[in-house]
Image (spheres, rainbow, N blue to C red):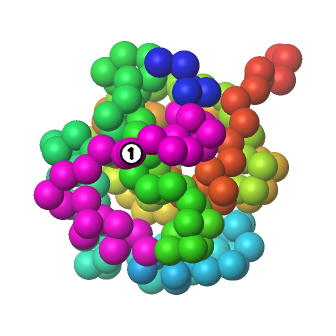
Amino acid sequence: MNPHELSATSHGTSALPTGPHKAAMLQAAYEFLAFVGDQPLGPELESRINDHYGPHTERFATLLKLLRHGIDEGWACYSEITGPDYRRGRIAEASPLTHGFTVESGKLRNVLGNYHRHPRGEINMIGPVDATGQFCGHGAGWRVFPPHSRHYPTVTGGTVTLLFFLPGGEIEYTDPPAP
């Protein structure tokens, strides 16, 4: 699947997949995004999230468990991007309940993903399936990319599941800079 097909506009009026644990995931995501509120996306927020929602917390364990239920139930990571090792899926549209963020899911295994830009930033929850799995050089925890940042979403060391939150669902797939 073309990564552009998962843009906010392509999901604007379509119903998103659902399942038995999705309501609990939505509630947990709403609570997390209420914590984030309107704080600027950057290193200070990353530190604060890791302190309050890090892998040492019950909140992290709950979000991760619900994400894994969503994968099993087919409402998370339901779209193949470049085969079974690179999957994504939208869980919730941007709304007042999500403080204007879309809630997205990913499951990647040893993948160099599609290069993109974050016009307003991005928040990632990293949940390694394999103990050595890392997303952009980070193991279990949270990574916050500030507005206008760019990267290849890169997973090494095995499989990683992700929740990611995009302000307004904004993401721009672009050509990488010339070497």
Spot occupied by residue 42 in the image (x, y as percentages of width and height) = 71, 66
Q: Quadrant of residue 53?
A: bottom left
Does 26 lie within the magenta span? yes
User: Is residue 141 visible to us here?
Assistant: yes
Q: Which residues are magenta?
A: 6-30
Point 62% across, 50% down: residue: 169
Query: What residue does disc 1 label?
Result: 15
> Callout 1: 10 Å neighbours few (<14), some, many (20+)?
few
- Asked if 74 appears above or below 104 in the picture, the reply is above
Residue 64, given in percent of the width and then of the height, sits at 28, 60
The residue drawn where x is 14% and y is 58% is 20
Task: Check if residue 98 falls in the magenta segment.
Answer: no
State the image quarter where residue 21 is shown: bottom left
Residue lying at 72% horizontally and 36% vertically, measured from the top left: 172
Task: Tell which of 60 and 34 is nearer to you.
Answer: 34
Could you say whether the residue bearing mark 1 is in a helix, strand or loop? loop
